[in-house]
Amino acid sequence: MLSRVLAFGLLAMAASWAISAKTLTGRQVFALTCHVCHAGGVAGAPPLGDVKAWRPHLAKGLRVLEAHAIHGYYGYSFMPPKGGDESLTDQEVRAAVKYMVASVRPGRRLDPRQ
Ligand code: HEC
């Protein structure tokens, strides 16, 4: 009995490790989900690397942008919660926001680890 409990505990640990090991980087989340709208500016989405389009969004500050990306946001258009992919964690969505914001900060190269 005890060995069963132990085996289950080990399995659970291994499973949670596998899940956390799969956390996506901002670049991966962008490539997976956000690019659908934020690569070409679909429905008015500010495109990656477009400084002018991002200016009014950046003015709100990173924390607001992260919250809007996670929970969704109606402005002049509609940003769906987590880009419509509920399987993304809040952390992954935040990483994707940072990745996009970094693309429009002059003088700052994109960090491939983000
Ligand atoms: C279905 C299209 C679509 C997808 C997919 C999408 N977005 Fe957006 N996003 C938009 C649109 C449209 C806006 C502009 C909303 C507005 O300001 O009215 C926007 C705006 C934003 C903003 C600025 C919000 C603000 O308050 O100004 C951020 C940050 C953002 N998106 C992040 C993301 C991230 C991160 C992903 C991927 C997880 C993503 N988006 C996926 C359409 C999309």
Image (spheres, rainbow, N blue to C red):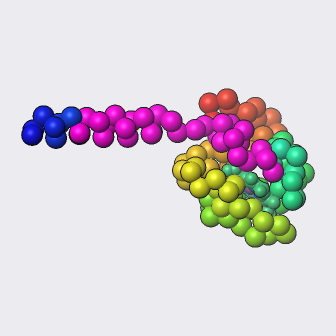
Dominant SS of magenta comes to helix
Residue 85 counted in the magenta span: no
- Figure quadrant of the N terminus: top left
Q: Is residue 21 above or below residue 69?
A: above
Give the extent of the magenta segment: 8-37
Could one spot residue 111 in this view of the protein?
yes
What number of labels is visible?
Answer: 0
Residue 45 point in image, percent of width and height: 83, 56
- For the point 58% across and 46% down, the residue is 92
- Figure quadrant of the C terminus: top right
Could one spot residue 64 in this view of the protein?
no
Residue 72 point in image, percent of width and height: 68, 64
- For the point 9% across and 38% down, the residue is 2
Q: As drawn, which residue projects farthest toward the top? A: 112
Which of 15 and 63 lies nearest the eye of the viewer?
Answer: 15
- For the point 66% across and 36% down, the residue is 28
Q: Is residue 38 left or right of residue 67?
A: right
Determine the image quadrant of residue 27.
Answer: top right
Ligand 1 in which quarter: bottom right
Determine the image quadrant of residue 113.
Answer: top right
Residue 9 counted in the magenta span: yes
Q: Is residue 85 above or below residue 95?
A: below
Determine the image quadrant of residue 48.
Answer: top right
Residue 104 point in image, percent of width and height: 81, 43
- For the point 12% across and 34% down, the residue is 3
Which of 43 and 102 lies nearest the eye of the viewer?
Answer: 43
Residue 107 point in image, percent of width and height: 80, 35
Which of 1 and 42 lies nearest the eye of the viewer?
Answer: 1
